[in-house]
Amino acid sequence: MEEINALFHGFSVALTPFNLMLMVVGVTLGVLIGVLPGLGGANGIAILLPLTFSMPPTSAVIMLSCIYWGALFGGAITSILFNIPGEPWSVATTFDGYPMAQQGRAGEALTTAFTSSFIGAFFAVVMITFLAPLVAKFALQFGPPEFFSVFFLTFCSFIGMGKEPAFKILAAMMLGFALAAVGVDTVTGQLRLIFGWHELMRGFDFLIAVIGLFGIGEILLSMEEGLSFSGRSAKINTRIVVETWKKLPRYWMTSLRSCLIGCWMGITPGGATPASFMSYGVAKRLSPDGAKFGNGQAEGVVAPETAAHAAGTAALLPMLSLGIPGSPTAAVLLGGLLIWGLQPGPLLFVEQKDFVWGLIASMYLGNIVGLIIVLTCVPLFAAILRVPFSIIAPVIIVICAIGAYTVNNAMLDIWMMLIFGVIGYVFKKLAYPLAPLVLALVLGDQAEDAFRQSMLISQGSLGVFFSNGLVGSIMGLGLVLLAWPLFGKLKARLKAAG
Amino acid sequence: MSEEKVTDPSSGGISMRAAELVVAAFLATIGVMVIYDSLRLGAKWGADGPEAGYFPFYIGCLICIGAAVSAAGALRGRATGLFVEWTALRQIMQVLIPAALYVLGIQLIGIYLASAAYIALFMVYLGHYSVVKGALLGIAVSASTYTLFEVWFKVPLFKGAFNPLTLIGL
């Protein structure tokens, strides 16, 4: 009960008119940042950090964390409307969210996404409130082999559960890994795969790839379909929110599962991106409507959004209790804490009670404020789809170009974006899946680091991945998923043989 | 990439089979390049652990395997039909070529001016809007991005090799 008392004390700290105003400002700025590709949550917070130096630390962190919630909500908007994920964790939201918008159900998709985000984040905040010390202990058991096994499981689930031919998934995924390896090797400092072209030293940023593959690729695809240059019909209905809410309770099982996946991935810093992909994959496999996923199933929006936000929120737990950030944005927030003279770690809970519980209380309030703001704007967002294609297409390309440029302030990236656009178009038509490519590009470096560190521990023996129950069972599960298509073929053959 | 594809004039477009083979060849080339560079860096177990090419070497091999199996599938006749019809390809080029010119424009005169011009020309030529409407929207989008990035967020965007904005004192 100590936590409850502390939490109510936190509410009294957070609930001042000034702080509430900062929440509204923060969420609005965050949504804006989330909508613009290239200005992610981490960049956004970094840019706005100086604004908060003059505020008291509690107010400052409330505003920054509200920017974070806003960015989490905002990432879903462009994914659903234009198939352009504003954030890596929104990639999985495009799979069903974009088809829904294409069918004129943009309002429903947006409401589903926002509500699921809220539920995921809320679940994680409740968990942070009560389980903080317990979970932190578990996260400390994670070493390099365990990290690699989590990555391995995520990648195997793609090959095992994808609709596309397994070898095409493999080729696309490995292309992502190869692109991730370009640039300076983090361990030896050697330059890899740049073939003397020094502008490639930075490597390929996933955002450039995502903007090109999804954004530009989608515009090329819609051109091919002989686009009538007219706007999509988007049902604008102010009651859409209530109507969607009536349908959502039937996905409670998917929701709960996604919350658990998200929290687990957020704490063991797997992060929001693998969480959203894994949750989507699991939902597809376990749902009775699994076969219809990808054609605009609301459940396919619920799963990734819930998990991404549960993970995004849960990532703040190791940051506060251990000083280990679970996501890039959490890392920037950590930087902010240090600037205000607050040392994150177990002692923070003892020495800065007001601050910690004020922050946790603001997580509850910020999410509620955020949900209200974005839901009231649903009809407005959905109305964007009514704009004719010959206006929206050049504007999207301009926004993509700006987004690609801002990532590294490099002109080369805009050209890369265009090339990725053509690759995205060709791959999509030939059933090479884009999601594993992007995922490998995002996680490639981390997966490789985890692999190399594990190999160092074991002096080159692969046995390290089966050296204890935890890592062994995750790896085993991964191998089963990898072999899943073979089981299917075997079964079909046995049936044919009688 | 699409322009380079082997064509089949009888079917009125690029065949699926040709497209599959070109993409498989493209992937295999990348795979071989990755393997080559990994071997250059050293793909074995060094004195202090795995060398820089250790992990990418296997990635390169797997790309080649994936490409080879996909190409074999296409050769065995799995890929049928058309990849894209000529008329559809023409429509794609109507967007892709101006987009490439736009990026070239950014390189020369910067993001703001190139964007305004691109939006205006796209609306006028492909959307058949009046010049006034196109110009208004183009300028509006550029002006709002300028306010957002340069003024509010203090993030300078690319102004081009010759920056014409200096002429009007921005």
Image (cartoon, coloured by chain):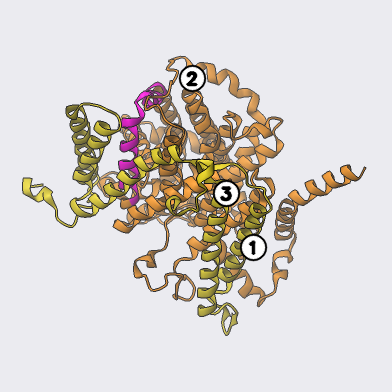
What's the chain of the residue with tag 3?
A: A
Q: Residue at x 58, y 31 (%)?
A: A295
Q: Main secondary structure of the magenta part?
A: helix
Distance of mark 1 from mark 3, alpha carbons?
14 Å
User: Quick one: label 2, few (<14), some, or many (20+) residues within 10 Å?
Assistant: many
Q: Position of residue B163 (x, y in %)?
A: 14, 53
Amino acid type assigned to the residue bearing label 3 in the image: Tyr
Q: Are marks 1 and 2 on the same chain?
A: no
Residue of label 3: A432
Give amino acid for label 1. Answer: Ile
The residue carrying mark 1 is B65
> Which residue is disc 2 drawn over?
A241
Looking at the image, can residue A352 be seen?
no
Residue A79 x/y as whole percent: 46, 37
Mark 2 vs mark 3: same chain?
Answer: yes
Separation of residues labelled 2 and 3 (CA atoms)? 36 Å
Q: Amino acid at mark 2?
A: Val
| Outermost residue to the right | A498
| A149 sits left or right of A88 in the view | right
Q: Are marks 1 and 2 in contact (CB under 8 Å)?
A: no
Residue at coordinates 70% horizontally, 60% vertically from top-left? Answer: A471
Q: Secondary structure at mark 2?
A: helix
Q: Neighbour class for label 3 at 10 Å: few (<14), some, many (≥20)?
A: many
State which chain is coloured yellow. B
Looking at the rendered image, the disc whose residue lies closer to the viewer, 2 or 3, is: 3
Instruction: Residue B66: name its quadrant.
Output: bottom right
Specify the farthest residue to the bottom. B47
> Could one spot residue B117 in this view of the protein?
yes
Residue at horizontal 34 percent and vertical 66 percent from the top: A199
Q: Colour of chain A?
A: orange
